[in-house]
Each structure stands twice: as structure tokens, then as C-alpha cells.
Amino acid sequence: MGPGAHRGVRGDAAPRRTESIAFHDLQQGGRTRDLPYYRELARRADSTLELGAGTGRVALELAALTDLWANDLDEQLIEELVGRAKARGLSVTPVLGDATELDLGRRFDLVLAPIGFAQIVGGQCTRQALLRVIARHLAVTGLAVVAIVDVDEVLRECATPAARQRLRARGRTFICQQLAATETEGGAQVIWKRGVYRRTAGRLTGRPVEPAVLTYHRVSLEDLAADVRACGLHAAHVHHDPGDATSLGSTYCVLHQGHGRSNAPSREGAAED
């Protein structure tokens, strides 16, 4: 399915679709801390490509500011993003596909890989494939932002089980709880407990859903800088957001083409809300 097109969802797929979308929204955790920074960049960009957009946590904040193209591998999430955009009177071009293999035949002023996406897609080989996609789609004078998280911070955050998060949709209550993170040789594996509940005739019944497992690969700034150079990009600068009670801290790595110039705000330190 190419940009600008999306297929409808069959009626018999609706429950599973709702479940997928609900758990995705819950696992996003209501993160908002990075949005002011991305809005600041989008105001300067005629066109923007977001990789790993999901249901639109970032994309829907930027669509009124720039020609927004949103990518994800999950067709259900992309369709939900398009529906939410239409409901808000916004225009978003959906791009279904693997972010490490895209070739859209055009370039963008701004390319975003938000919080941890470059670590979730895989190890070094996969990360370099993602950076090559960014290089392929980044305008000569454009900029890209790759946000990475500190795996040790992920492990610390998950040391104590988080409170359950709830979302009600289509007469059901979806519950998601981040249980713990296990340190692996290359990073951290985060486990999410999930369940779906319905109240029928005054009784609450539920069923567990297979836990979700999310792996963050450990990436140092030095490792990322080496990958960036290998893919023909240049790391213009980095700045840090220490995070807060609802969001992991991030390091924003601002990139541009090796011979281009960056239009990034010349700001160091934490991103501001």
C-alpha cells in the first residue's frame, strides 16, 4: 500500500483492531515532554517524515504545521492515525512499511525517529539501515532528529512495577502494566502485562492477553555517531532532556547531510516544555 492510500477494516477484525490500538496507546504512556521540541522544528519545515508513528502521538501534533508523512509497519495503527487526523480536520499522508527499507522517491525538510525508535528496531545493522533510510529521504538543507534513551534509566524505571493503566473502548476496559525490565547482553527487555475486561449483568469478567515484550538496544552517543558517519550523515549537535515522572529522558541527536547545513535551533541542554 503506497502513500495516500489505506484500506478499510473488516467488521470481523474490529475487536482485534481495537485491542491492538488500545494497548499501543496505553504503552505510549501519555508521553508529551518531547512534543514542544518537535513542534518547534516542524514550524520551520515544509515537509516532515515521521518513522514509527504508531497511532499519531507525535504526528497529530505536527500535521497542522507541516506536510506530514507518517510511517509505521502496523497497518491497523496507521489506519487509526488517519482516522484520528480526519476527525481533527488534519491531513496526514500514511506510509505503510518497514522503516528500515523505505524508498519514497522524495526528500523531506525534517525526518523524525522519536523516543527510542532507533533502539527498538534492532541492533547495529538494523540501526544503520534506518540511518540510510533517513539519509535517502533527508533534503540537502534539512535535518533529522534521532532520539535515544539511556538503557540504564529504563532498568531503573522498571525496578518497581508501575501502576496499572486503563483505557475504556467499545464497552471493554483495557489494562496494561509495565512489570519489569530484564537486562540483556545488548540492552533491556521490558515486559508489559495486559488484560481485557467487560462488565456483563453486573459481573466483571476478563481475560489475559499475551504480554508485550519491548527490547531497547543499548546505544552510546559514540556508537551512534560512528553509525551516522558510516551512513553519510553528520551529527550537528545533541541535547538532553532529563525526563520527568511520565516520560523517560531522551538524548536528541540532530543530524544533517554530510555537506548540508542544519536549520536546527541552536539550543543545548534539556528540551523545554
Image: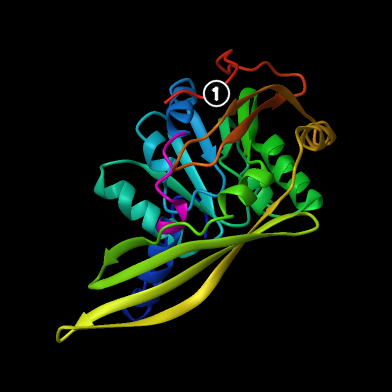
Whether residue 160 is visible here, answered yes or no, is yes
Badge 1 is on which residue? 270
Predominant secondary structure, magenta span? loop
| Image spot of residue 196 (x, y percent) | 36, 75
- Name of the residue lying farthest toward the left: 201
What residue sits 56% from the left and 40% below the top?
114
- Does residue 7 lie above or below 162 as drawn? below
> Image quarter for residue 241?
top right
Q: Is residue 206 placed above or below 132 in the rendered structure?
A: below
Q: Is residue 142 left or right of residue 186?
A: left
Which residue is more in the foreground, 43 or 170? 170
Q: Amino acid at mark 1?
A: Ala
Whether 219 is among the magenta residues is: no
* Quadrant of the rendered image containing residue 226: top right
Residue at image location 75% in from the left, 42% down from the top: 219
Q: Residue at x 52, y 60 (%)?
A: 1
Q: In this picture, is 207 found above or below 163?
A: below
Question: Which residue is at the far top?
Answer: 266
Neighbour tally class for label 1: few under 14, some 14-19, many 20 plus, Cα within 10 Å: some
Q: SS for tag 1?
A: loop
Name the quadrant of the C terminus: top left
Q: Is residue 64 left or right of residue 226?
A: left
10 above or below 94?
below
**In the image, which residues are magenta?**
26-33
How many marks do you count on the picture? 1
Identify the residue shown where x is 53% and y is 72%: 211
Place of residue 231 in the rendered image (x, y in percent of width and height, measured from the top left): 80, 36
Its colouring scheme is rainbow
